[in-house]
Image (cartoon, coloured by chain):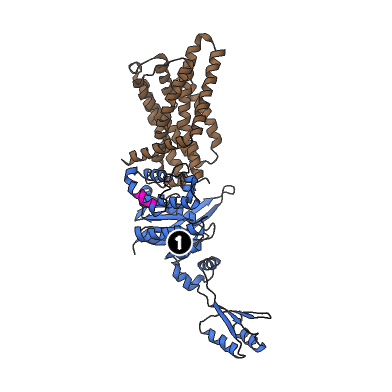
Amino acid sequence: MRWLNLLKANMRKEYLELKRYLPNTIAMLLTFYIIFLGLFGTIHFIGDPSTQDTNIQYVIVNYIFWFLTITVINSIGYEVINEAMRGTLEQLSMSPMGIWRIMAARLVSTTLINIVIVIGLLYLSMATSGQWLNIDIMTIAPILILTLISMFGVAFIIAGISIILKQVQAFLQILQFILMGLTFVPLSLSPVLAFLPFVKGIDLVRNVMINGISISQIGMGDFLILGFNAIFYFAVGLGIFIYCERVALNKGLLAHY
Amino acid sequence: MESIIEVQNLKKSYRKRKSKEYVKAVSEVSFTVNRGEILGLLGPNGAGKTTTIKMICGLLTPDSGSIKINGIDNKDKRLKALRHISAVLEGNRNLYWRLTVKENLEYFAGNRGLSRRDVSVQVEELLVKFNLKGKENELVNRLSRGMQQKLAIAVAMLADSEVILLDEPTLGLDVETGYEVREILKALVRDYNRTIIISSHDMDVIQNICERTVIINQGKIITDDKVENLLRLFDVRAYTVELGDSLSEQQEQLLLQKFPQHEYTKDALKSMLSIDLAKSGEIYELFDILKLNNTPVEAIDRKTINFEQIFLKIVKGEKQDALAKPS
């Protein structure tokens, strides 16, 4: 029950802040939509016409996932920095629930709210391009959940680093391009890529949405890799976050003001 | 009296960034706080007050020593110990400025695992208690600093913890709001049996609401005593005597012999004599000298010493031997 109350409180806060910072939210969505229009226009006007449809479909899925990774992974870093500068991180750290649980609740809340935005962006980009993808919820949902868990692991690492390093903004700016690389890279480039945090998951979703494969056509091996990645990255991420929290408590780094 | 906080041999050093040297922030600090007590933690800037407060509320791990809150070691069982403690460290900075008064209260309660329904009655009670009723739907960034400060204390109250730590609770507040916050703090102890630790540079706050003070300087406790004991210890018998006539040479000689530290000034209209007496009986000797020439006494004022002056004297090292040391 305490967990649920924690999640509800953070969900409400995320929603209220999104509403209060509405111009920022709209500007962010517009930026992403303009980026999509740029990508779409490039393929449409100067790309190879024989592969145009497939390329546009790839771009839609990749850019949607890029948006999701940025809002889940990158934004937690900025949030930690802001909270540390504002003085609220110390206040949160005094909660008997523990800061990692609060961060987990934040991640889940941000993700759930942003999934709604992602769905909106997905349909907007499909309508703009005229390319309607296969939205098979039953197949996409389990892949997405496992992929998100590995994303949370990476987000915990970023949050931990943001607690102990004051000048992490520059890295966060670079990170969004690293995330872009990870979401756009095709798995066919190297099988090792399957073990990177969310590359395998995005590749499977691409297969579902573009090639129309269903859950029964996905092998057990693929799910095992997804499951392994989810557990591995979440455990490593959480471990690193807890270690960073301990360092911060030793050095008094919970406040950056 | 039952102690709710036990601080034992606390040590904390920080490493300097460039020289890599260690600087002692807190060294061998030990004290206890009794249930229902208001304790003032004082010291000049850089004395180690904030470090001590942060270690008590689990935001900083001590290098050695222990802190027990309600019998729970806050190093080994940090989260369990945090159930009994809440703090306002940066006043209005500890709040979410884009959330309303009520949303802030509910959000922080949620972060302690409580639902909005669980705290609805308490939220209403606190809004009334802190004179924030009518402002509950106002965004925090639109409130005055005083109201933000009161809200920060209300957030700490909502945690329902027995101990509340306050770092500079009246900093930047106007006289009226400062007074209001002081009255609220007194009421917290009186009506809710909370234990409060205050770190402040506002000596009026300390003198008015604290029963006991722990004074820290250079990371060490200089004294741990009741406010009234310190006031008594540093009580002065200093007088300013306004005379209706000048003193004769003989009187001046006698004053110099009896009271070598006195100050005597005279002008065309009046003479002033400032004098420190070692014992209260010495005042009769002063009168004897004045009586020699029947020098008229227009007024006598006894100088009083406030807690701020006492604090400065203690920090400068006066009456070291007479000060109560931590046990």
Q: Please rate how many residues cluster around mark 1, counting C-alpha atoms within 10 Å: few if below 14, some from 14 to 19, many from 20.
A: many
Could you say where residue B146 lies in the image, as x and y percent from the top left?
48, 53
Image quadrant where one finds the C terminus of chain B: bottom left
Residue ID at (50%, 41%): A82
Could you say where residue B229 lies in the image, as x and y percent from the top left?
45, 71
Vertical order, B216 against B240 (above or below): above
Q: Which residue is mark 1?
A: B40
- Residue A134 drawn in magenta: no
Given the image, on which type of amino acid does mark 1 rest?
A: Gly
Colour given to chain B in the rendered image: blue
Front residue (pair A100, A1): A1
Magenta: predominant secondary structure element? helix
Q: Quadrant of residue B288?
A: bottom right
Q: Quadrant of residue B71?
A: bottom left
Could you say where residue B217 lies in the image, as x and y percent from the top left?
52, 61
Colour given to chain A in the rendered image: brown
Magenta range is B122-127
